[in-house]
Amino acid sequence: MKRWIFDLERIRGVANYQFESEIGQKMFPDDVIIEYSRKTGRIKHIYLNGSLLATLRPTNGFFALTINGSKRLMSLVDYSRFRIVVHEDVESFIREGRNVFAKHIVKANGKIRPGEEVVVINNKNVVLAVGKAVLSGEEMLAFNRGVAVKVRTGTEKQRLCGGLLKKSKKN
């Protein structure tokens, strides 16, 4: 029990540092479930109500958000801080998990830094994908070429993979 409390405070501290001060308590309430790596015993996944919110990356100690985690984050923080808005024409590609190019970005916060976790949305605030910024927010708007966001997973990709996982667990 003591370790769980320590680990809960640790993941909240990482969230406060990575996303915004005091977001950790809201993002990861007391009823989260922490999954540990069998091999190393380190924190691996964080679940809330049976839904995977984030994975703690062992390489850099930061969170890699899932679609559910990104939706939760967006409901808790400033509207524009971690959001990238893209053109309507590319929505289907982004949902499939394709990378976001700078020329397709409509809005991006100037405070976004390369390597930071970002959420890709459309102009109606619907989450399309989650990934890592390759360019700063200012560069995303200034450039007309190149990858701006390396997408980790799109909503369509997660829906398809989630369905396959659920089917395989029943067998």
Image (cartoon, rainbow, N blue to C red):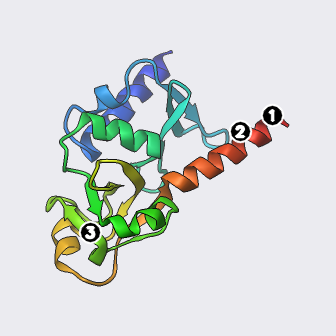
* Kind of residue indicated by mark 1: Lys
The label shown at residue 105 is 3
SS of the residue at dot 2? helix
Residue placed at 25% from the left, 52% from the top?
Answer: 82
* Kind of residue indicated by mark 3: Ile
Q: Horizontally, is 160 left or right of 111 in the view?
A: right
The label shown at residue 162 is none
Q: Residue 130: percent from the left, percent from the top?
A: 41, 54
What is the distance, in whole Å, between disc 3 and disc 2 at their CAs?
A: 34 Å
Q: Residue 25: percent from the left, percent from the top?
A: 30, 26
Q: Horizontally, is 9 left or right of 59 in the view?
A: left
- Mark 1 touches mark 2? (CB < 8 Å): yes
Which residue is the site of mark 1?
A: 170
Mark 1 or mark 3, earlier in chain? 3
* Kind of residue indicated by mark 2: Lys
Which residue is the site of mark 2?
A: 166
What is the distance, in whole Å, between disc 1 and disc 3 at their CAs?
A: 41 Å
Outermost residue toward the top in this view = 1
- How many C-alpha atoms fall within 10 Å of the one at disc 1: few (<14), some, or many (≥20)? few
SS of the residue at dot 1? helix
Quadrant of the drawing holding the C terminus: top right
Residue placed at 18% from the left, 41% from the top?
Answer: 78
Location of residue 131 by image quarter = bottom left
